[in-house]
């Protein structure tokens, strides 16, 4: 599952993940992310930290508290690159932190490491 408000980034992630053999669930409005995750049980969630309606860190925290999503591996992605930002994401429950621009290779390697599948 990819939670991203930028349509270009959403298309890019979808293309990369599909090319790597995944079936990504794209979520353009973060207010729907918890419902989508609980319904579809994705293998991993890639979440932009800077979102317009809900702070990505709050979304990560909420997903980690949910019964259906507590064990969902989460990759926090952001243009922010300060160690405080990484620390905040990890404290909220993110399993991994990536600064944009994200590399297709780093993203797919991270998914493999988190899920055990390509």
Image (cartoon, grey):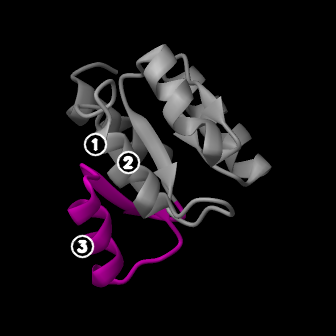
Question: Residue 68, position in %: x, y?
Answer: 33, 24
Instruction: Pick whichever, 53 or 22, lies toward us.
Output: 53
Q: Quadrant of residue 38?
A: top left
Q: Which residues are magenta?
A: 77-101
Q: Tell me, yes or no, whether the highlighted magenta stretch contains residue 23.
A: no
CA–CA distance in space, label 1 to label 2: 5 Å
Please give the label number shown on residue 87: 3
Position of residue 42 relative to residue 89, above or below, is above
Q: Is residue 111 visible?
A: yes
Q: Of helix, strand and loop, which one carries label 2? A: helix
Contact, mark 1 vs mark 2 (Cβ under 8 Å): yes
Q: Which residue is mark 2?
A: 62
Q: Which mark, residue 114?
A: none
Above-or-below relation of 102 to 40: below
Q: Position of residue 4 (x, y in %)?
A: 63, 49
Please name the residue shown 36% across and 84% down the image.
82
| Outermost residue, right side | 7
Q: Is residue 111 left or right of residue 59?
A: left
Q: Which residue is mark 1?
A: 65
The quadrant of the image that shows the C terminus is top left
First-in-chain label (1 vs 3): 1
Query: Against 114, is 24 above or below?
Result: above
Are the residues flagged by discs 1 and 3 in contact, CB closer than 8 Å?
Answer: no
Question: Number of callouts in the render?
Answer: 3
């Amino acid at each position: 599952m990819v939670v991203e408000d930028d349509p270009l980034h959403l298309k890019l992630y979808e293309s990369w993940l599909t090319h790597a053999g995944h079936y990504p669930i794209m979520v353009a409005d973060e207010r729907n992310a918890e419902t989508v995750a609980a319904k579809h049980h994705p293998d991993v969630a890639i979440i932009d930290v800077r979102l317009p309606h809900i702070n990505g860190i709050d979304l990560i925290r909420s997903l980690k508290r949910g019964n259906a999503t507590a064990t969902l591996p989460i990759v926090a992605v952001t243009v922010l690159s300060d160690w405080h930002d990484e620390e905040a994401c990890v404290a909220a429950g993110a399993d991994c932190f990536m600064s944009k621009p994200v590399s297709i290779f780093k993203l797919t390697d991270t998914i493999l490491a988190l899920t055990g599948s390509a």
